Image (spheres, helix red, strand yellow):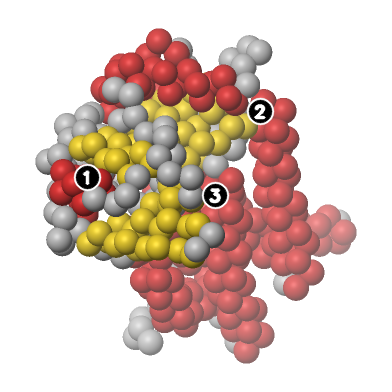
């Protein structure tokens, strides 16, 4: 435990000044960028995750059985199923290090023909997450390989520029050649028509079959509007229930202080989302609601200490009680914040997609929630309590006159 109490009340003006400056920066960035970077959940249209991956092999099967290609560990497996049973042939990447080697080995199987489109590609870079298991037929099945090419985000934007309202973002490291493409809704357009437009534009620029669609989502304008209004309603209802709960458990001053601190946390997270151009999606809403619960729990612990200290020593001032309560709770606050950050930090660094977005939002939310529950909420409690005391004194004076 700290030997001296943290001067929370003396630092209150600096704390709120820092919060004000950060919120102002967020407001300026929001105006400068023209709004949030809305995800497909809240912005109607088509969202696709694509990977620029060259075709290395084309495989055909001329038989009348079921021939299926799959990837198992570090090998490519071919299963041929017929009335007499299943025949499985494995081609280990170590023994067939290039696409040319794989093509030669596959062609050695009866009724299977494989052609190396780019024989220099490494077998271990064969994309396993898309198109597998692949059922072979007389129509060539293209196998794509991850390649550390030099495709930039500007190349993808250039390829899709003719489609109009298109947003492109890089996903993961540049070496993965993976991009997130968003296409705004068009009049009389359907999901299939918009997907076809993107497919044709990318094939024209990068070559037929050299672009793999990893994920494709389509949100209509009606659904996106409903989802946005429902998300806002969820946050408002949560804040209202929190106000009632804290008011019932403590007093009105405590409830309002908690609510203002939680409002600060939400606005600060929106500030970071705007400044860093993070995607604002339903995952963001989930992170906001989680942080509200996290921050409120820490605030209630501190307010509980304040109420307990006031009861034990009624002669001390409210500012002394607040400083003492925050100091007494600091050990728990630090342990809670650090352990939670340690748990989500690997997700924020190594994960991808919605999980990474949630972890990043949670990381910033924990920092802001810790700041508000230890500095802003106690300071607000001090101001409101003083205002209430002053109002009660004035009422008492008026009654005696």
Q: Nearer the viewer, mark 2 or mark 1?
A: 1
The residue nearer to you, when weighing 212 against 168, is 212
Q: What kind of element bears circle 1?
A: helix
Residue 89: x %, y % from top left = 32, 61
Q: Which of 398 and 119 is in front in this view?
A: 119
Whole-percent x, y for residue 148 in the image: 17, 41
Q: Nearer the viewer, mark 3 or mark 2?
A: 2
Report the side of 110 relative to 165 (left or right). Answer: left
Contact (Cβ within 8 Å) of mark 2 with mark 1: no
Residue 283's tag is 3
Label placed on residue 220: 2
Find numbered disc 2 in the image and state the secondary structure of the residue it sits on.
loop
Point 73% across, 72% down: residue = 250
| Residue placed most toward the observer, 368 or 178 | 178
Say which quadrant the C terminus sits in: bottom right
The CA span between labels 1 and 3 is 43 Å
Name the residue that disc number 1 marks. 103
Is residue 347 among the parts visible in the rendering? Answer: no
Mark 2 or mark 3, which is nearer the start of the sequence?
2
- Residue shown at the point (32%, 49%) measured from the top left: 110
Q: Residue 164's spot in the image, x, y percent? A: 45, 12
Vertical relation: 77 (above or below) 43: below
> Which residue is drawn at the image coordinates 58% and 54% (left, top)?
286
* Dot 3: element: helix
Q: Report x, y in % for residue 247.
A: 76, 65
- Dot 1 or dot 3: first in sequence order is 1
Apparent side of residue 41 relative to residue 353 in the rendered image (left or right): right
Q: Are marks 3 and 2 in contact (CB under 8 Å)?
A: no
Can residue 126 be seen by looking at this rendering?
A: yes
Disc nearer the start of the sequence (2/1): 1
Q: Tell me: 299 left or right of 370.
A: right
């Amino acid at each position: 435990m700290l030997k001296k109490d943290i001067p929370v009340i003396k630092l209150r003006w600096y704390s709120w000044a820092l919060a004000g400056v950060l919120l102002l920066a967020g407001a300026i960035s929001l105006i400068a960028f023209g709004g949030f970077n809305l995800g497909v959940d809240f912005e109607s249209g088509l969202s696709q995750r694509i990977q620029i991956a060259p075709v290395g092999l084309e495989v055909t099967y001329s038989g009348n059985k079921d021939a299926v290609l799959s990837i198992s560990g570090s090998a490519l497996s071919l299963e041929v199923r017929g009335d007499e049973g299943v025949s499985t042939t494995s081609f280990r990447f170590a023994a067939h290090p290039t696409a040319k080697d794989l093509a030669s080995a596959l062609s050695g199987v009866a009724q299977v023909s494989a052609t190396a489109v780019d024989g220099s590609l490494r077998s271990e870079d064969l994309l396993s997450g898309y198109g597998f298991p692949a059922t072979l037929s007389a129509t060539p099945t293209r196998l794509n390989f991850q390649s550390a090419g030099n495709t930039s985000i500007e190349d993808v934007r250039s390829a899709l520029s003719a489609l109009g309202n298109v947003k492109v973002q890089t996903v993961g490291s540049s070496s993965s050649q993976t991009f997130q493409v968003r296409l705004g809704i068009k009049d009389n357009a359907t999901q299939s028509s918009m997907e076809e437009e993107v497919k044709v534009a990318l094939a024209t620029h990068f070559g037929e079959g050299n672009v793999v669609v990893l994920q494709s989502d389509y949100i209509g304008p009606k659904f996106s509007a409903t989802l946005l209004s429902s998300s806002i309603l969820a946050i408002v209802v949560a804040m209202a229930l929190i106000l009632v709960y804290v008011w019932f458990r403590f007093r009105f001053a405590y409830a309002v202080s908690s609510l203002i601190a939680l409002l600060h946390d939400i606005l600060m997270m929106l500030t970071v989302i705007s400044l860093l151009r993070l995607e604002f999606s339903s995952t963001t809403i989930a992170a906001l609601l989680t942080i509200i619960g996290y921050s409120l729990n820490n605030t209630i612990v501190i307010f509980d200490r304040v109420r307990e200290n006031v009861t034990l020593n009624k002669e001390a001032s409210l500012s002394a009680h607040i400083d003492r309560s925050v100091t007494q709770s600091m050990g728990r606050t630090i342990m809670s914040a650090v352990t939670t950050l340690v748990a989500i930090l690997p997700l924020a660094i190594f994960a991808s997609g919605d999980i990474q977005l949630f972890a990043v939002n949670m990381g910033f939310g924990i920092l802001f929630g810790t700041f508000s529950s230890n500095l802003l909420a106690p300071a607000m409690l001090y101001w409101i309590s003083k205002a209430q005391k002053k109002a009660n004194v004035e009422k008492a004076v008026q009654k005696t006159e």
